[in-house]
Amino acid sequence: MMDLWLPEDFRVYVSPDGGVANVPYEGSEERVLATVNLYQGEDGGYVAVYSHHAEAGVYSVGGGIYVVGQVRLRGRYVGRVFHPTGFEQRDISAASEIAFVCNQAFGGGDWECWGGGDTGGWFGFEG
């Protein structure tokens, strides 16, 4: 089992056209993607925290949706998508339990956030 950890001040690199990577590249701007390592065990991974609140966003994924941070939970990756324990067969973007965790970590009073598991790219996972 791989021990997958990211620092709480995880650096991402965003291009003017919206591309994002975890290594610098020409024309990109360095930004900090706040990372909350809630789960400390080895069998964990990251849920991306999304919002429609542009001012809180670190980068856009399109459609008025922004990534504001990420949270480490217990679970596993299937391809590049993280599945928290207990949500292996569920769409976590619609799960109120995951939204609650996201809002506890990043929510800002007058705006809501939710989670998604497509974070395996940080580790080079494909699929």
Image (cartoon, helix red, strand yellow):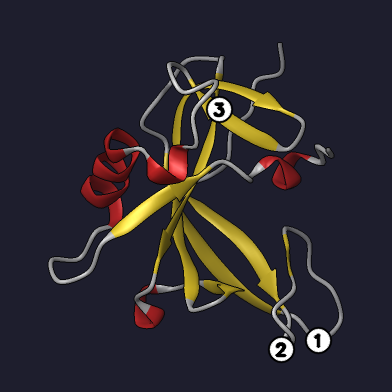
Q: Which quadrant would the C terminus be assigned to in this image?
A: top right
Q: Position of residue 85 (x, y in %)?
A: 46, 17
Mark 2 or mark 1: name the one nearer the start of the chain. Answer: 2
The residue singled out by tag 3 in the image is: 83
Q: Is residue 19 left or right of residue 97?
A: right
Mark 3 or mark 2: name the one nearer the start of the chain. Answer: 2
Q: Secondary structure at mark 3?
A: strand
Q: What is the spatial separation of the Cα atoms under label 2 and label 1, in whole angstroms?
A: 7 Å
Q: Secondary structure at mark 2?
A: loop
Q: Is residue 110 left or right of residue 91?
A: left
Give, as a three-letter code, the residue at label 3. Answer: His
The residue singled out by tag 2 in the image is: 16
Residue at image coords 63%, 45%: 118
Q: What number is the disc on residue 27?
A: 1
Mark 1 residue crowding within 10 angstroms, few (<14) / some (14–19) / many (20+): few
Q: Nearer the viewer, residue 75 or 91?
A: 91
The mark closer to the camera, 2 or 1, is: 2
